[in-house]
Image (cartoon, grey):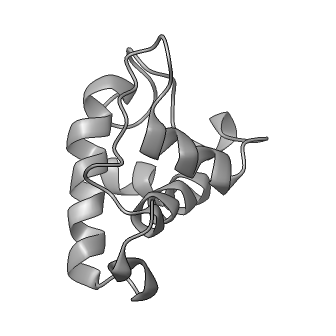
Amino acid sequence: MSHASDKKPLTDERKAQLTHIVKQDCGSCHGMTLKGGLGPALLPENLEGKNELFLQYTILHGRTSTAMPPWKSLLTEQEALWIAEQLKQGAMAEKAN
């Protein structure tokens, strides 16, 4: 899935929106501080061994036989990759606290 907007850098406003999505929508299953819940923890130490492209794919396409839904109708590839990078760096967990 590729959108024309994939070519433009994400704006600070869009990054703030994506952070809100992670905190509210992802947090409802992965815990509000991303330390786990119905879904696994999304902290850097829990994501070791998973590269950003794997996480991007999971965000966009979900996980079969789990509660993880696909987000490809709401997020571009670039946005999903940005979220994956932020999760790997721990930036989302810091913002959730």
Q: Residue at x 65, y 54 (%)?
A: 53
Q: Residue at x 44, y 86 (%)?
A: 7
Q: Residue furthest top?
A: 65
The quadrant in which residue 38 appears is top left
> Is 32 rendered above or below residue 53?
above
Horizontal and vertical percent for residue 94?
A: 42, 55
Q: Residue furthest bottom?
A: 8
Q: Is residue 44 left or right of residue 33?
A: right
> Is 5 rendered above or below residue 64?
below
| Res. 97 in view | no
Out of 69 and 40, give the one closest to the viewer: 69
Out of 37 and 63, give the one closest to the viewer: 63
Horizontal and vertical percent for residue 18?
A: 28, 61
Q: Residue at x 27, y 45 (%)?
A: 23
Label tally: 0
Name the quarter where the N terminus is drawn: bottom left
